[in-house]
Amino acid sequence: MIKVPEPLEDVIVNLLRLANTKLPEDIGWALEAAAAWETNDIARSQLGGIMDNVKKAEFAGRPMCQDTGIPVFYVTGKIIPGTEDAIRSGLRKATDTIPLRPNTVHPITRKNPGGNLGKGMPIIRYRPTDDNFTEITVIPKGAGSENMTRLAMLNPADGIDGIKKFVISAVLEAGGRPCPPTVVGIGIGGTADRCVELSKEALLVPADSVNDDKDERELEEELFTILNSSGLGPMGLGGDTTVLKVRVMTECCHTASLPAAVNISCWASRRATVKISADGSAEYRQK
């Protein structure tokens, strides 16, 4: 049994505030590194503007971007009773108090129910385990980057070269719309729906971590080099920095299939996690 010392909805508000107002540390270091190696004057100016915006947002406790996205929640560990109700009420409260832009609308009528709620919202993925703690992670995805999601059901004969061609095309065709420099999540394998899920989950992997899978790591490094050599640059205005990181996640697939998906995150790569221990203590982090 997990003890929660404060209303769980307030934990959700704190989690959403952290994700939207403070840049993850690893992304901050990646932006600093990009500014150091960038040779294009316009690109350096764009990176400087981004970092200035980040500092002001954290100081003021306001969202880094006006598009606060649609939050996707991942709940792992021991599931606390009432978690879904707490996430919903916390999201509504956060929308009013942080504030977050109410982004959710009905896909046909375009009616906005308010509170970033409505049919099917918020999106919550449950991963129950026997651990004696609960972790809740949120990744707010704005439309500028989410609209650039791509899925390809490749022929197995296309192989690794087909995957590379697909990823490079997806990122470069997205251009400046997802607000580069971006984080590129790549899912390979599974089924069509699982492949897209993998590509989004890949965005949660810290930029400064090392992939233990040799094949995945080599693909990440090659695509990172190719994409940053493309000249697309920050905000699509040219430069040496198109991506801050590339992350690959794979799962086995049918022998007759080769699914590949790309999910892009803007430069902010917003995310945050809270770990609620058995004693009720809550530890927030962005890695």
Image: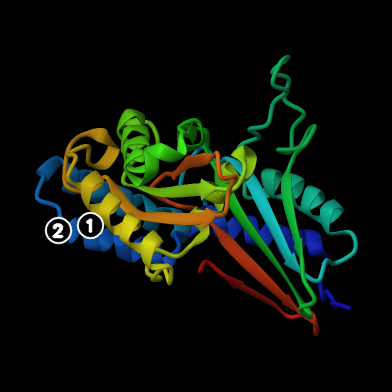
For residue 61, say whether it is visible.
Answer: no
Secondary structure at numbered mark 2: helix
* Residue 103: percent from left, percent from top: 63, 32
The answer to whether 179 appears left or right of 222 in the picture is right
The answer to whether 232 appears left or right of 15 in the picture is left
Taking the spot 49% from the left edge, 56% from the top edge, the residue there is: 249
Taking the spot 54% from the left edge, 52% from the top edge, the residue there is: 20
* Residue 68: percent from left, percent from top: 55, 42
Q: Residue furthest top?
A: 109
| Residue pointed to by mark 1 | 34
Callout 1 touching callout 2 (CB < 8 Å):
yes
Secondary structure at numbered mark 1: helix
Q: CA distance from mark 1 to mark 2?
A: 5 Å
- The amino acid pointed to by label 1 is Ala
Task: Give the quadrant of residue 33.
Answer: bottom left
Which of 250 and 275 lies nearest the eye of the viewer?
250
Please rate how many residues cluster around mark 2, counting C-alpha atoms within 10 Å: few if below 14, some from 14 to 19, many from 20: few
* Residue 133: percent from left, percent from top: 76, 77
The answer to whether 237 appears left or right of 113 in the picture is left
Please rate how many residues cluster around mark 1, counting C-alpha atoms within 10 Å: few if below 14, some from 14 to 19, many from 20: many
The answer to whether 180 appears left or right of 144 in the picture is left
Which of 287 and 283 lies nearest the eye of the viewer?
287
Taking the spot 37% from the left edge, 69% from the top edge, the residue there is: 208
For residue 104, say whether it is visible.
Answer: yes
Q: Residue furthest bottom?
A: 279
Way the structure is coloured: rainbow
Which of 52 and 165 lies nearest the eye of the viewer?
165
Which image quarter is the N terminus in? bottom right
| Residue pointed to by mark 2 | 37
* Residue 243: percent from left, percent from top: 30, 49
